[in-house]
Amino acid sequence: MTGSDVPPSFRLAYVPGVTPAKWVRIWQERLPGIPLTLVAVAAAEAAGVLRDGGADAGFVRLPVDRTAFSAIPLYTETTVVVVPKDHLVAAADEVSAEDLADDIVLHPLDDTLDWETLPGRPANERPATTADAIELVAAGVGVLVVPQSLARLHHRRDLTYRPVTDAPESRIALSWPEDATTDLVEDFIGIVRGRTVNSTRGRTTAPAEPKPAKRAPAGGARRQPAAGKTGKTAGKTPRGGAGGAKGGKRGKPRRRS
C-alpha cells in the first residue's frame, strides 16, 4: 500500500487531567469515516510526541515553544492542595500558601506548576510522579499542591482538596506543530472552538454560483398602459357622434340619382 493509499486518520495526544471525550464524540459525529486515536502522554513528553509525529495535535499544558508549535489556550485550572480528610485544611473553604508553612509539601518530578518559591517545608526526596505523591499524602507524609484536574484524576475516599488562592495556575491549550497545520488539524480546531458543521473552518471555498436570470415569457413582456390611457383608442371619439354623447341622431341616407 503506497502512501497515497493510506486511509486518513487523526491522532490526538492529551496530558493527564484533560478529558477529551466531548471533542472526540463531536469528531465521530462529523467525520465518521476518519478514525481518531487518543494518545496519552506525560506532560513533559507532550512536545516531543508532537515534534516527532507521534500525534497530529494535542491537549498540553502551557507554556510551549512558540517557535515550533501553534497553540490555542482553552482554560485555566484552579490550583488545590490535596490533604487527608482529617487535616486542618479540610475545615476551610480555601487556603493560602502561607497556611501551608508548617506542612511538608511534596514536589513530584512531574509537577506542572511554575513555582517561584515552594510553600511549606520540603520533603527529603521528591516523588517520581504525582501518583506516587498522592500515595504519600494518604500515608500522612505530607500534602500536595496540584491542578484540580489531577486531584480529581487521583481521587481517593480518604483524601480531599481545597483551593489555594495564591498558587501558580496551570493552563490547558490545544497545540500542534506550526509547519503541520493539515486539513484534519483545521477540522479539529473548528470542533474545539465550537464552530458549526457548516463552517468553512478557515479553508478556501469556491464562490457560490450566481442564480440564472429569469427568462422573459415568449413573445416579450406585455407593457402596462400608461396612466390615463386605455389602449390604441385612447383619446379618440367613437363612431356615431362627437365625444360619444348618447342620443345623437343619424342623418338620412341620400338617394342615388
Image (cartoon, helix red, strand yellow):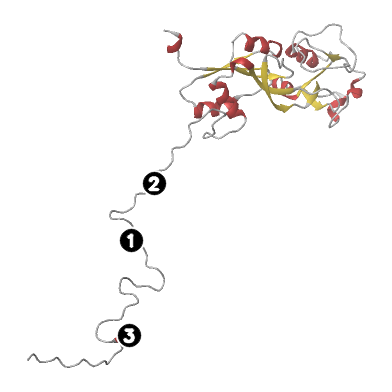
149 relative to 198, above or below: above
Total residue callouts: 3
* Label drawn at residue 243: 3
* Residue at position x 31%, y 54% in the image: 217
Provide the secondary structure element on which disc 3 rests: helix
Position of the N terminus by quadrant: top left
Q: Please give the residue where the numbered disc 1 appears in the rendered image.
A: 222
Q: Quadrant of residue 22?
A: top right
5 relative to 72, above or below: above
Residue located farthest toward the front when viewing the structure as drawn: 257
Mark 1: few/some/many CA within 10 Å (<14, 14-19, 20+):
few
Camera sees residue 193: yes
Q: Is residue 29 left or right of residue 142?
A: left
- Mark closer to the chain start, 3 or 1: 1
Please name whichever residue, 214 or 78, is drawn nearer the observer in this view of the structure.
Answer: 214
Cα distance in 3D space between marks 2 and 1: 19 Å
Q: Quadrant of residue 60?
A: top right
Mark 2: few/some/many CA within 10 Å (<14, 14-19, 20+):
few
Q: Amino acid at mark 2?
A: Ala
Q: Quadrant of residue 154?
A: top right
Cα distance in 3D space between marks 2 and 3: 47 Å
Query: Where residue 78 appears, x then y in whole percent?
Result: 77, 27
Q: Are marks 2 and 3 in contact (CB under 8 Å)?
A: no
Query: Where residue 231 appears, x then y in whole percent?
Result: 32, 71
Q: Is residue 120 left or right of residue 247?
A: right
Please name whichever residue, 27 or 198, is drawn nearer the observer in this view of the structure.
Answer: 198
Q: Please give the residue where the numbered disc 2 appears in the rendered image.
A: 213
Query: Where residue 214 appears, x then y in whole percent?
Result: 37, 49
Q: Amino acid at mark 3?
A: Gly
Provide the secondary structure element on which disc 2 rests: loop
